[in-house]
């Protein structure tokens, strides 16, 4: 009889206890998949959003949370004149509760700026000009709000007609409400204010030139910062907090899994004292007894991890379709997260089995045989 056969038989022989332990581990791993997948998905969705819009540098005051503080729109004129800046445009973007949707991205963009150019009209038309009281909806936003061309959307105290449905080639764009900057400022009471200045740089701008430009912007706007678009999400305080919260919450679930596996393995050692004594009596080394217990706990962790990944993936698919999430992000369930999650489960199993393995190796063959 091989070591692996004994390990598998030990788990199968106590199906109820093994099953309950697997449930505990799988719930912990499902929490990792769901929470971390959402956090990573939001980051990737925002990066894709910036890339699709053709933004090279973002100027903001990110000292708050995910959405930065507003500042004077007149800064764009000064920043737009700096060397290497091909085009600049101002944006007022906020996460708002809109009608029945608990959270939607509402993006007010400077009229005729380059951030309008990637939008493809699917139905209806674009606003006629920057002063028209009108908005367009991304495809997903239209589905979430159940709106069509000709309907109105209430943003704060303003009723704004929907003149078009657009495809923005990114989840964040398709889940957004898009209107001209002046209409957005009026609707939210932020006249003359923006919270982003987006820059396109001239072709072939080097990293050193981009860094120098960011320093010049810092001199003009000391309380703000200019960041290369690809680095905005990774350095945002709001995203760092979201990542920390997702992992810390997952950790609590993982700790529950550790305790469950440890309890199962301790009970296994106590119940198999006679069997372990026989194995020691027939020549098994204590080191091999340790390996047996650790392999058993590691296998529990692996199976729980696989089940947890499956459960978490189902949970992410369900969450992705909810009105609170749809259109804001595309959850990330890539190979990296799957390998990390299963790896965590195996480590949980091994760590949980260390003390039971040590206890089993301390048994005396004579006492075990008498038991």
Image (spheres, rainbow, N blue to C red):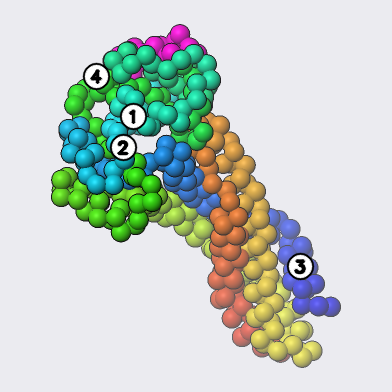
* Residue that numbered label 2 is attached to: 87
Can residue 148 be seen in the rendering of this structure? yes
Between the residue at mark 3 and the residue at mark 4, the CA separation in whole angstroms equals: 68 Å
Between the residue at mark 2 and the residue at mark 4, the CA separation in whole angstroms equals: 25 Å
- Judged by depth in the image, the label closer to the viewer, 4 or 1, is 1
The number of callouts visible is 4
Between the residue at mark 4 and the residue at mark 1, the CA separation in whole angstroms equals: 19 Å
Mark toward the start of the polypeptide (2 vs 3): 3
* Residue that numbered label 3 is attached to: 8
Mark toward the start of the polypeptide (3 vs 4): 3
Q: Is residue 284 left or right of residue 308?
A: right
* Residue that numbered label 4 is attached to: 186
- Residue interval drawn in magenta: 148-163
Horizontal and vertical percent position of residue 171: 50, 35
Q: Residues within 10 Å of mark 2 (few under 14, many from 20)?
A: some
Q: Are marks 1 and 2 in contact (CB under 8 Å)?
A: yes
Q: Secondary structure at mark 2?
A: strand
Residue drawn 77% across the image and 73% down it: 4
Residue drawn 59% across the image and 81% down it: 358
- Judged by depth in the image, the label closer to the viewer, 3 or 4, is 4
In the rendered image, the residue lying farthest to the top is 150
Label the magenta part by its dominant secondary structure: strand
To which quarter of the image does residue 161 belong?
top left
* Residue that numbered label 1 is attached to: 113
Between the residue at mark 2 and the residue at mark 3, the CA separation in whole angstroms equals: 65 Å
Q: Secondary structure at mark 4?
A: helix
Horizontal and vertical percent position of residue 276: 72, 80
Mark toward the start of the polypeptide (1 vs 3): 3
């Amino acid at each position: 009889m091989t070591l692996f056969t004994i390990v598998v038989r030990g788990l199968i022989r106590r199906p109820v206890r093994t099953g309950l332990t697997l449930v505990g581990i799988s719930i912990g791993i499902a929490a990792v998949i769901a929470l971390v997948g959402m956090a990573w998905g939001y980051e990737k969705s925002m990066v894709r959003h910036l890339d699709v819009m053709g933004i090279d540098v973002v100027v903001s005051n990110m000292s708050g949370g995910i959405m930065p503080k507003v500042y004077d729109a007149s800064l764009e004129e000064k920043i737009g004149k700096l060397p290497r800046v091909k085009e600049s445009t101002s944006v007022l973007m906020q996460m708002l509760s809109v009608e029945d949707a608990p959270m939607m991205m509402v993006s007010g963009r400077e009229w005729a700026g380059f951030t309008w150019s990637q939008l493809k009209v699917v139905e209806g038309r674009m606003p006629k000009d920057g002063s028209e009281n009108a908005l367009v909806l991304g495809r997903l936003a239209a589905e979430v709000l159940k709106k069509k061309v000709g309907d109105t959307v209430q943003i704060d105290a303003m009723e704004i007609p929907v003149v078009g449905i657009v495809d923005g080639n990114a989840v964040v764009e398709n889940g957004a409400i898009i209107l001209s900057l002046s209409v957005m400022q009026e609707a939210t009471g932020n006249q003359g204010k923006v919270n982003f200045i987006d820059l396109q740089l001239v072709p072939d701008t080097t990293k050193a030139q981009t860094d120098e430009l960011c320093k010049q912007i810092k001199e003009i706007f000391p309380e703000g910062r200019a960041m290369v678009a690809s680095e905005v999400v990774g350095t945002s305080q709001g995203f760092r907090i979201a990542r920390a919260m997702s992992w810390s919450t997952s950790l609590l679930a993982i700790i529950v899994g550790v305790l469950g596996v440890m309890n199962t393995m301790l009970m296994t050692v106590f119940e198999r004292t006679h069997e372990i004594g026989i194995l020691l009596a027939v020549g098994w080394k204590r080191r091999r007894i340790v390996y047996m217990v650790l392999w058993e706990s590691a296998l529990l962790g692996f199976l729980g991890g696989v089940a947890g990944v499956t459960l978490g993936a189902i949970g992410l698919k369900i969450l992705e379709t909810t009105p609170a999430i749809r259109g804001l992000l595309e959850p990330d369930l890539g190979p990296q997260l799957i390998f990390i999650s299963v790896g965590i489960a195996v480590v949980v199993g091994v760590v949980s089995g260390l003390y039971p393995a040590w206890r089993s190796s301390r048994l005396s063959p004579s006492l075990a045989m008498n038991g």
